[in-house]
Image: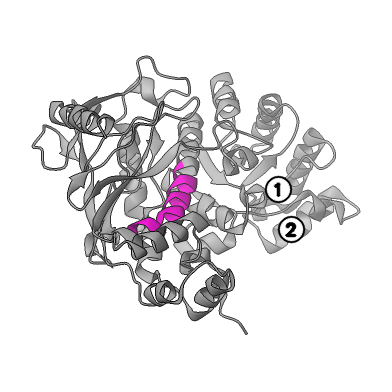
Amino acid sequence: MSDPDDQNPLRQAVFTDLYELTMAQAYDAESLDRPAVFELHFRQMPKGRNYVVAAGLESVLSYLEHWHFTDDDLDYLRSHGVFSEPFLDRLAGLAFTGDVMAVPEGTVVFPDEPLVQVEAPLLEAQLIETLVLNQVHLQSVLATKAARVVTAAAGRTVIDFGSRRAHGAEAGVKLARASYLAGAVGTSNVLAGKLYGIPVFGTMAHSYVQAHEDELDAFDRFQQLYPETTLLVDTYDTLAGVHKVVELSRRLGQRFRVRAIRLDSGNLAELAGKARKIFDRAGLDGVKIFATSGLDEYQIAELVESGAPIDGVGVGTKLAVAEDAPYLDLSYKLVEYDGRPKMKLSPGKPMYPGRKQVFRIAQDGRITRDLLGRHDEDLPGQPLLRPVMQGGKRLSAARVPLEDIRQHAREELDRLPQPLRSLQPASPPYAVQVSDRLRADVETLRRELESC
């Protein structure tokens, strides 16, 4: 049987773009392999977002710890006829030996701020670009969407149901982790539960009810196996299904322990209100109402604002694909080489040269602004970038339990000013200011580059 890791992108150095390898060979031929610093940042806030929740660092560090080219990788690269034997020999001996600074997962971040900072020999730092971008991009996009869903739910239970619509199996698992990190109580994905210790949830689908001749009989049979279950009541007629749950409670008497019903279609607010009245009249005030059916944060907010008696929501497709803002303008750029600051002058794509630090300023328990400065500046505020890897080895401080990351994310979201927690764009947006010394570096380097 083959090793499952053979198909795991997080164990394959060839999960990279071809131009990373062609550049690496050119660097090698020119002996360009002095220490380089790359930073991962985004230039613009995604549509409708007031903040981004940083996520994916755990995946990046795991990748870097195992990063190497196998004999099979080298044979594949050799088959292209592009790479020389000396260069392939160089790849055969490579491992990641660099240092990494990063903002902790769960931290809220803003445009132009480095999320991850890599300092390593140029070949190593260049070749890891694709996966570093891939993992931080996906998980930050999903964690941000999930945080908004949790905010909209206003204390009601949120469960990730999105695996089946995620863009691939790995994305489904990372969705579950990102959602839990951002405040969901669990996931329907069993593998994610196994890998990350996330609580898993789920009971029945419509097919179970359809497989029986009688809906009430289906409910009865299912609760015999799972007494404290959630029953799906909208297979045929939702309110008729609710009445059958009441009938089941009368049949079982003290043995009735069904915890909730799930509504998966129709006017959820109206149906929830009618179901609640039916249950309350029957003395079943302890039966909760759980809603699904293509929900996103906007629909959930409408349900909450309408006063619909819904106790929890399951969110699937629109969370899994971050439907309204599915991408982040994330870039991994060289900012320093051999001790000298670097930048590019491409129109519409500004960047700041050199290693940087982000200093966060708070007042009365709320964050108020960030200062982006040089890494060696002593500016007011809390530095956000922290060491997580040295010499290719993860630091003990970077081995953070998921529950601690989740708590950090909760605290970060609680520290946001109220306008930033809104589902609508904040005006003005959160302030990220640039230090005078960093601005001076930009102008100095600009003049040097324009004179070349």
Type of amino acid at the residue the image marks with label 2: Phe
Locate residue 212, reporting x and y percent. 87, 56
Locate residue 45, reporting x and y percent. 42, 29
**230 falls in the magenta region:** no
Is residue 239 or residue 209 the one in the foreground?
A: 209
What crowding class fits label 2: few (fewer than 14 Cα within 10 Å), some (14-19), or many (20 or more)?
some
In the picture provided, is 410 more to the left or to the right than 131? Answer: left
In the picture provided, is 179 more to the left or to the right than 319? Answer: left
Q: Would residue 158 be seen by someone viewing this image from the given angle?
A: yes
Main structural element of the magenta stretch: helix, strand or loop? helix
Q: Earlier in the sequence, mark 2 or mark 1?
A: 2
User: Which secondary structure, mark 2?
Assistant: helix
- Residue lying furthest left in this view? 378
Residue placed under numbered mark 1 in the picture? 231
Please say if 354 is above or below 88: above
What crowding class fits label 1: few (fewer than 14 Cα within 10 Å), some (14-19), or many (20 or more)?
many
Magenta residues, start to end: 125-140
Tag 2–tag 1 contact (CB < 8 Å)? yes
Is residue 7 or residue 277 the one in the foreground?
A: 7
Distance of label 2 from label 1 (alpha carbons): 8 Å
Residue placed under numbered mark 2 in the picture? 222
Type of amino acid at the residue the image marks with label 1: Leu
